[in-house]
Image: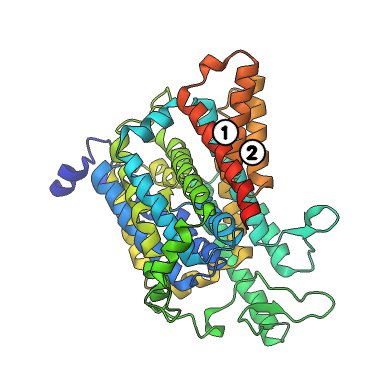
């Protein structure tokens, strides 16, 4: 205990060893959903689900360890929601890249992001952003995460007449998703503090169990089966024939095993050790000769910077990391962990990490030091060896409640702080949020929102209130959009 006190100053921070341990464990429970969700999202881009799972757990362990030891904050890090979706759907799938090329691009952006984080540039840019804009960016992230959850669970489906629509409740996965979301919201408002705090993991567990029962019955009756590509699909002609988003018991899938590290070689170092025989040198050529890459690198740096800032702002007030003016205290120590994560995530085979708002769970239970982060970090390490336990949580019907409820919390906690009396701020919030959701891109939302903000400030003769870094960022986004347009011509 004396050693821990010297390292973490537990008593000095008005905490106890019990508070730190309980806080760390509960923080992990509240955010462990990210492991199956991240593996599910990146597997959509062609990566090995089990490999991404293991590497996400390993990276989460390493960077959380750094946060606990270096910064001594009870802040836990893992793959950032929003960043993983941006990488998989916007960078890789939308542009037709291979996932290997996407990971090389992520590595390049991570190196630049690491350099920026170690210089005054990052802090000056963040400090130059008005508090209202920081809050709007965070709220946009929350709205985007909600939409990702609804889309991945197929609750929201495409429609030829209305573009998007509510999917049919004949699909048991859709019905289960909606019920899970509603119950999760209900649990968030019960009087019991423990249940209220753990509403998301409780809902996920409940939905997973019910989903397993339904899918097992349907598999045994032949109404769900594997297709030629290895996907579980419905076999109900005329009613349901699409891929199911129900969780499947691991016993039905021989590829899912305990302590199975076979998927690691498929994602580690861009899969150069896998059977695909990926040509790394050619991958570098592909990335640096493709105009899309430079747009992607810039976008990833910007999204990473604002995503990390959003989550630190969400947690920072509770642990006194953010002062009353929205400035970050001990900034360099606080960002070294996510900067290191950005540097190594690509080679490891997973998306960039960020500080998680769920860290406030541990803070609310009394955690005040980095020892809570250490505890949560080791929980991530242990999860590496029990992948099948988490496999059932990768289904869209299970993850939807977590994504929607986490997104709504981020959305609400930031929206309530915005100065709505200023109509210009309100219009900026509307533009940034609506474009983030409807373009399925946080980067697009932030870019169009900042450009609109700068134009409105100039037209209202308040241009001097906007810092030079904001104008520069808006200009860079304009150049980014122009490059994207030209890229469509080059394709």
Which residue does the image show at 66% across and 41% down from the upper left? 435
Which corner quadrant of the image does residue 368 belong to? Answer: top left
**355 vs 206, nearest the viewer:** 355
Density class for disc 1 (Cα within 10 Å; few <14, some 14-19, many ≥20) is many
- For disc 1, the marked residue is 136
Q: Position of residue 457 (x, y in %)?
A: 60, 19
- Is residue 272 depicted above or below 19 in this figure? below
- Is residue 130 depicted above or below 19 in this figure? above
Please indicate, yes or no, whether residue 489 appears anywhere in the rendered image: yes
Which residue does the image show at 44% across and 26% down from the upper left? 128
321 sits to left or right of 69: right
**87 vs 414, nearest the viewer:** 87
Q: CA distance from mark 2 to mark 1?
A: 8 Å
212 sits to left or right of 378: right
- For disc 2, the marked residue is 433
Q: Position of residue 208 (x, y in %)?
A: 58, 67
């Amino acid at each position: 205990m004396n050693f821990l006190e010297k390292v973490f100053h537990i008593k000095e921070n008005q905490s106890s060893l019990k508070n730190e341990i309980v806080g760390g464990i509960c923080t992990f429970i509240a955010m462990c959903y990210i492991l199956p969700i991240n593996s599910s999202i990146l597997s959509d881009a062609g990566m090995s689900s089990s490999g991404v799972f293991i590497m996400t757990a390993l990276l989460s362990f390493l960077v959380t360890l750094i946060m606990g030891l270096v910064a001594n904050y009870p802040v836990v890090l893992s793959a950032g929601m929003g960043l993983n979706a941006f990488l998989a759907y916007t960078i890789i799938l939308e542009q037709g890249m291979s996932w290997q090329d996407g990971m090389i691009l992520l590595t390049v952006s991570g190196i630049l992001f690491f350099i920026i984080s170690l210089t005054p540039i990052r802090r000056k840019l963040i400090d130059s952003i008005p508090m209202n804009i920081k809050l709007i960016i965070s709220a946009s992230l929350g709205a985007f995460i909600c939409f990702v959850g609804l889309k991945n669970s197929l609750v929201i489906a495409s429609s030829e007449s209305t573009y998007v629509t509510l999917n049919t409740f004949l699909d048991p996965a859709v019905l289960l998703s909606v019920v899970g979301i509603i119950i999760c919201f209900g649990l968030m408002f019960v009087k019991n503090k423990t249940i209220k705090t753990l509403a998301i993991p409780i809902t996920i567990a409940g939905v997973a169990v019910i989903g397993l029962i339904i899918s097992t019955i349907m598999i045994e009756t032949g109404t769900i089966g594997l297709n030629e590509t290895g996907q579980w699909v419905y076999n109900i002609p005329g009613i349901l024939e699409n891929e199911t988003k129900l969780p499947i018991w691991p016993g039905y899938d021989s590829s899912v095993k305990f302590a199975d590290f076979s998927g690691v070689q498929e994602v580690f170092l861009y899969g150069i050790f896998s059977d695909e025989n990926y040509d790394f040198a050619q991958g570098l050529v592909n990335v640096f000769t493709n105009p899309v890459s430079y747009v992607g690198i810039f976008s990833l740096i910007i999204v990473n910077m604002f995503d990390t800032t959003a989550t630190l702002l969400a947690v920072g007030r509770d642990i006194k990391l953010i002062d009353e003016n929205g400035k970050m205290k001990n900034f360099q120590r606080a960002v070294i962990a996510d900067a290191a994560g950005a540097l190594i995530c690509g080679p490891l085979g997973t998306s960039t990490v960020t500080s998680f708002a769920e860290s406030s769970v541990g803070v609310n239970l009394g955690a005040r030091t980095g020892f809570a982060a250490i505890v949560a970090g080791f929980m991530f390490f242990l999860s590496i060896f029990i992948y099948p336990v988490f496999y059932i949580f990768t289904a869209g019907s299970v993850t939807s409640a977590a994504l929607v409820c986490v997104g709504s919390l981020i959305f609400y906690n930031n929206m309530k702080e915005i100065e709505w009396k200023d109509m210009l701020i309100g219009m900026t919030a509307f533009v940034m949020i609506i474009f983030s959701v409807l373009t399925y891109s946080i980067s697009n939302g932030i870019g169009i929102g900042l450009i609109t903000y700068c134009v409105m400030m100039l037209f209202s003769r308040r241009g001097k209130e906007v810092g030079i870094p904001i104008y520069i960022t808006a200009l860079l986004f304009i150049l980014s959009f122009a490059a994207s347009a030209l890229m469509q011509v080059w394709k």
